[in-house]
Image: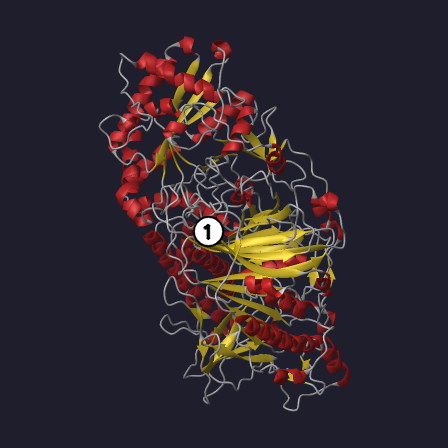
């Protein structure tokens, strides 16, 4: 690389090439310790010479590190062959030839993936009628003016079309209540939502023909808990009588771009469990009018929860126009990987610009606005088209009814049935009694007139969402949820969303990344706390100690479930709320995180006690400390310091939240450089002692990092370790670039990404400070730039933890103005215009870079991973937080790290993004060799990660928690390792949750537990490398009774995903069977 280019990218690319060289060429570089003394000569005065000199020093240090790590494998073999012993008896140590000697457990690991478990990824899929990637290739995205329906076309009809089959019209009143956006959740509830629900109770009761739908259970639960029994009974009567329908029934209307499927399921369970406990109702239809684009994961989850139909709204206007022209706005939404039709769910796409009243009655908003009776003259809201509504009276009802019917008929021409859906509402509507009267009384007059004039051939009424879907099924002659004859089948998703012009909502994929990261930390803690709590309670019951265990921790679990659920709201995790609302979310997240840490340490305390008889729980005297602490909701975590002294040893409990054994490096802080770590049976653990850095160049004299290699978590054979020589053939550079925003008219904001052109190389005045740390367990290079700090670490560990690069980018762009910082990986992989991004951490979606679309349209959400590949290699970027990603050139992956924007983007927020935090973005880079170069497979609509890739994602998202035992005056009672599983879980199974189910009458746990399993699909066409644990697959079979050690299984009952529908119990010794990609739930009773 030329020197000029090195300066342009501030050494970033060279830095990364050097690190990748360290990673790849472990056995190619000659060891020359003498060079260390030669690196400190006088620097030339010019900055270029200084930078060149520093790079040379870095390369020298890295070369030493290459050789150190390359000797490890041979050294371990020498250790077994020669019985080499450290002079001090401690491990690791350096042998006479200068290499590091590490211990290992001699029992071998094995990898046994059955060929049948590989066939799913290679299998044939039936062709769907509508494949979204094909539709993107087909469309021109030309935005032609369509007249009154600006983004569509003129709609015409023949007057006699409904003579034989009258038009059925269902007007569905609704109120979209954001659980936080411009106001906080509580402020919205106080100011508006409680009044909506109170008025609903009165106004629906006045006339049984009135209907309403409600979506956000978070608000409904808050209202319910503050209402007396008379109000509750009246509301229950409205629901059971069919006047009020609970649609979707989730805690919130979840974001679908950034949310992880664990949290999407959890918020659905939380809402459905609340409905089951308090109302006994089961939602049938999904309602998602406001998420900014729609994921294919959502229809799968709704289908598994036994919903039969769903509705979506925010879809690219060109796609809406295309689907409208072919009458494909209603379709069966099928998963791209489905080999049959098991995942099909009926979906209705709203055709027009918005879900407000002007854009729901028909194609002409000027006319539809005249039928939004809240906008009657004298009110606070008016019609932008300058023609106000008129109250319906006898003198105008005929003219008004015919005008409205014309819109209904035109809208119905876009659909295949003669049933039309007309939503009637908007954000926080119906908060005043006056609006209930304005809408319901005027519309009822219109309906009465239409229905009493047979020559109009229309039957109009208020309805719920399920009323509409039921009428469609009935008109088509099919049962609920079945495919009507002739309706298309669609696969794919609906990102990126654009509502007009080139205004793509791809900025929110990254907006406020600090909180996107905190959300995932909380999710991992929630899953870990759920599992440990369920196991601890079951073991306490088994030991007859249920009364001594703090089951009151269940209230902390409930609080955290609801916080995680609330944050999945499409203005929360999206990063699109006002600054004070973000602080409110942040405080809730922090409070729940602290509560979950308490649940975890209390459960771990009970489970690791060797003699349960001496177990005592004291609320004010915890047995364990938490692994880290956060001072405030917007601060980074600080690890807990373990203070060592002469009084005796300190004890450390490690919690591995992953269902597989795991060998990994764990970092703890101590106050002494003289440290020795022992396992519970007295074996010495290998340790790397490193400095704790107070600044880029200053070490702390009081605090040290201790990084043990806890072999107690896993049995592994180091001699099976592969050095990933595959990487020798691939050139990878890491560059940093910045985007600005447009200089005039519309600019980027919290939602929109409107860049001022292609990205520019990141630049700063001087060269970065570069720090190199090397050791037996890990080595790392840290580069300090003005606006970010880049850490690349290599773990010298056999198995999954050592087979990828551990990369952290600490970003701080608070000094910037209208800038977006991106990390770009540049490789020589021949990926052309194709790349792959995940949907919600659940499945992979192929993408294409389209030159016909603007740059911002080619960005997609990346909740957990993205990859590029050619016939030989696949490079995966694993992420611990949701961010926006793209591939703008062959061989590139680019991810937006943070955005600081000084203005609103005119989507209702009224603010820019100016509350940036110092944020740690964590990644893993995994490069794999493809053993089957099959471009035919690549061209299909499906792709899957490898087994190693699945494991890499798991270890990145679920870190081992290091919990110090607090010193006790009475001494520490005997502890032992708690291993909950009798045998290894098949390595294509993921234990998504082990969730204690609520008691029907109290806020305590019942005797039932929900086991939620996900069987992952594997791409076996990548070279199989030893993952570091015993890995077998079983063709989807799992015997649950043999899963948990020392517990009796007394009930095994399949249930729907949100636990509302139960199938007959299975025999306790039965095997359960899951297909690849399937998520299944079971109700267990463990004792």
Residue at 47%, 58% in the rendered image: 517
Observer able to see residue 828: yes
Residue at the (56%, 27%) spot, across then down: 328
Q: To which quarter of the image does residue 488 belong?
A: top right
Vertical position of residue 568 compared to residue 450: above or below:
below
Asked whether, in this view, residue 947 is left or right of residue 351, the answer is: right
Please, is residue 277 above or below residue 949 in the view? above
Check the picture and name the quadrant holding the N terminus.
Answer: bottom right
Report x, y in % for residue 715: 67, 71
Query: Furthest residue to the bottom?
Result: 87
Relative depth, front residue between 555 and 130:
130
Give above or below for 1072 relative to 12. above
Position in image of residue 107 (x %, y %): 72, 73
Task: Please give left or right for residue 79 compared with residue 13 in the image.
Answer: right
**Judging from the image, what secondary structure is the residue with disc 1 in?**
loop
Residue 551 in view: no
Give the residue at mark 1.
Answer: 740
Q: Position of residue 6 (x, y in %)?
A: 59, 64
Crowdedness near tag 1: few (<14), some (14–19) or many (≥20) residues, C-alpha within 10 Å = many
Q: 1083 or 178: which is nearer to us?
A: 178
The residue under the point 66% across, 85% down is: 34
Colour mode?
secondary structure
């Amino acid at each position: 690389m030329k020197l000029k280019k090195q300066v342009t990218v501030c050494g970033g690319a060279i830095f990364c090439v050097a690190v990748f060289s360290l990673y790849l060429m472990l056995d190619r570089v000659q060891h020359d310790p003498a060079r260390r003394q030669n690196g400190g000569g006088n620097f030339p005065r010019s900055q270029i010479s200084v930078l060149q000199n520093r790079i040379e020093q870095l390369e020298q240090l890295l070369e030493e590190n290459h050789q150190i790590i390359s000797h490890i494998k041979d050294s371990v073999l020498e250790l077994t062959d020669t019985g080499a012993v450290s002079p001090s008896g401690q491990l690791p140590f350096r042998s006479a030839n200068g290499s590091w000697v590490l211990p290992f457990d001699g029992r071998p690991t094995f990898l046994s993936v059955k060929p049948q478990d590989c066939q799913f990824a290679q299998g044939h899929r039936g062709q769907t009628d509508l494949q979204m990637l094909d539709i993107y290739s087909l469309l021109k995205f030309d935005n032609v003016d369509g007249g009154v329906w600006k983004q569509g076309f003129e709609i015409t009809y023949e007057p006699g079309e409904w003579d034989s089959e009258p038009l059925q019209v269902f007007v569905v009143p609704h109120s979209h209540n954001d659980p936080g956006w411009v106001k906080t959740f509580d402020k919205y509830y106080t100011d508006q939502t409680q009044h909506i629900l109170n008025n609903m109770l009165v106004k629906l009761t006045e006339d049984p023909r009135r209907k309403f739908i409600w979506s956000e259970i978070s608000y409904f639960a808050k209202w319910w808990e503050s209402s007396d029994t008379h109000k509750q009974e009246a509301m229950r009567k409205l629901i059971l009588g069919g006047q009020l329908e609970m649609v979707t029934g989730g805690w919130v209307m979840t974001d679908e771009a950034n949310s992880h499927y664990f949290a999407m399921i959890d918020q659905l369970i939380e809402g459905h469990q609340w409905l089951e406990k308090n109302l006994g109702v089961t939602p049938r239809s999904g309602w998602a009018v406001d998420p900014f684009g729609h994921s294919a994961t959502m229809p799968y989850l709704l289908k598994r929860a036994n919903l039969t139909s769903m509705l979506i709204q925010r879809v690219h206007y060109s796609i809406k126009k295309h689907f409208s022209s072919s009458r494909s706005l209603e379709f069966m939404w099928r998963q791209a990987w489905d080999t049959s039709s098991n995942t099909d769910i009926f979906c209705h796409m709203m055709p027009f610009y918005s879900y407000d009243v002007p854009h729901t009655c028909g194609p002409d908003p000027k006319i539809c606005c005249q039928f939004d009776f809240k906008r009657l003259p004298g009110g606070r809201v008016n019609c932008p088209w300058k023609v106000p509504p008129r109250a319906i009276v006898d003198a105008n009802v005929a003219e008004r009814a015919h005008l409205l019917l014309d819109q209904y008929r035109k809208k119905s021409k876009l659909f295949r049935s003669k049933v039309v859906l007309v939503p009637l509402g908007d954000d926080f509507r119906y908060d005043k009694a006056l609006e209930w009267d304005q809408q319901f009384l005027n519309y009822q007059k219109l309906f009465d007139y239409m229905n009493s004039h047979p020559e109009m051939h229309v039957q109009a009424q208020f309805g719920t969402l399920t009323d509409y879907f039921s009428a469609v099924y009935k008109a088509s002659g099919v049962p609920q949820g079945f495919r009507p004859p002739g309706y298309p089948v669609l696969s794919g998703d609906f990102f990126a969303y654009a509502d007009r012009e080139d205004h793509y909502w791809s900025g929110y994929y990254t907006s406020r990344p600090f909180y996107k990261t905190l959300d995932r930390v909380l999710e991992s803690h929630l899953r870990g706390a759920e599992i440990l709590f369920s196991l601890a309670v079951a073991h306490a019951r088994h030991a007859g100690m249920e009364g001594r265990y703090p089951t009151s921790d269940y209230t902390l679990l409930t609080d955290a479930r609801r916080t995680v659920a609330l944050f999945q709201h499409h203005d929360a995790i999206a990063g699109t709320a006002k600054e004070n609302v973000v602080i409110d979310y942040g405080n809730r997240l922090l409070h729940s995180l602290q509560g979950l840490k308490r649940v975890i340490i209390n459960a771990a305390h009970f489970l690791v006690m060797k003699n349960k008889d001496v177990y005592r729980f004291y609320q004010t005297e915890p047995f364990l400390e938490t692994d880290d602490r956060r001072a405030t909701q917007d601060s980074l975590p600080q690890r807990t310091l373990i203070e060592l002294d002469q009084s005796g040893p300190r004890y450390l409990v490690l919690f591995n939240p992953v269902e597989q054994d795991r060998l990994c490096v764990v970092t703890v802080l101590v106050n002494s450089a003289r440290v020795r770590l022992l396992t519970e049976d007295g074996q010495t653990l290998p340790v790397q002692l490193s400095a704790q850095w107070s600044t880029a160049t200053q070490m702390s004299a009081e605090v040290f990092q201790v990084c043990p290699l806890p072999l107690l978590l896993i049995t592994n054979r180091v001699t099976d370790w592969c050095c990933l020589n595959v990487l020798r053939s691939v050139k990878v550079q890491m560059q940093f670039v910045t985007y600005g925003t447009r200089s005039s008219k519309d600019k980027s904001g919290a939602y929109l990404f409107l860049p001022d052109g292609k990205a520019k190389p990141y630049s700063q005045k001087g060269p970065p400070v570069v720090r190199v740390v090397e050791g037996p367990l890990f080595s790392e290079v840290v580069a300090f730039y003005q606006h970010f700090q880049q850490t690349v670490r290599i773990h010298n560990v056999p198995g999954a933890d050592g087979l990828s690069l551990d990369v952290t980018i600490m970003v701080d762009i608070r000094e910037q103005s209208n800038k977006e910082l991106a990390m770009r990986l540049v490789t020589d992989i021949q990926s052309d215009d194709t790349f792959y991004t995940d949907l919600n951490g659940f499945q992979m979606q192929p993408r294409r870079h389209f030159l016909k679309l603007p740059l911002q349209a080619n960005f997609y959400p990346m909740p957990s991973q993205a990859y590029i590949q050619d016939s030989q290699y696949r490079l995966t970027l694993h992420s611990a937080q949701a961010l926006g990603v793209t591939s703008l050139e062959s061989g590139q992956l680019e991810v937006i790290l943070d955005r600081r924007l000084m203005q609103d983007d005119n989507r209702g927020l009224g603010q820019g993004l100016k509350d940036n935090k110092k944020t740690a973005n964590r990644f893993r880079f995994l490069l794999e060799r493809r053993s089957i170069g099959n471009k035919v497979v690549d061209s299909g609509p499906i792709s899957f990660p490898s087994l190693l890739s699945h494991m890499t994602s798991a270890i990145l998202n679920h870190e081992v928690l290091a919990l110090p035992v607090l010193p006790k005056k009475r001494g520490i009672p005997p502890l032992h390792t708690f291993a909950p599983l009798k045998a290894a879980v098949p390595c294509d199974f993921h234990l998504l949750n082990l969730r204690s189910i609520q008691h029907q009458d109290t806020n305590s746990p019942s005797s039932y537990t929900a086991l939620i399993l996900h069987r992952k699909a594997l791409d076996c066409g990548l070279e199989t490398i030893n993952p570091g644990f015993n890995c077998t697959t079983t063709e989807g079979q799992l015997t649950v009774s043999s899963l948990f050690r020392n517990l009796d299984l007394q009930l095994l009952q399949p249930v729907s995903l949100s636990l509302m529908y139960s199938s007959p119990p299975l025999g306790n010794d039965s095997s359960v069977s899951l297909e690849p990609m399937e998520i299944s739930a079971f109700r267990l009773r463990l004792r």
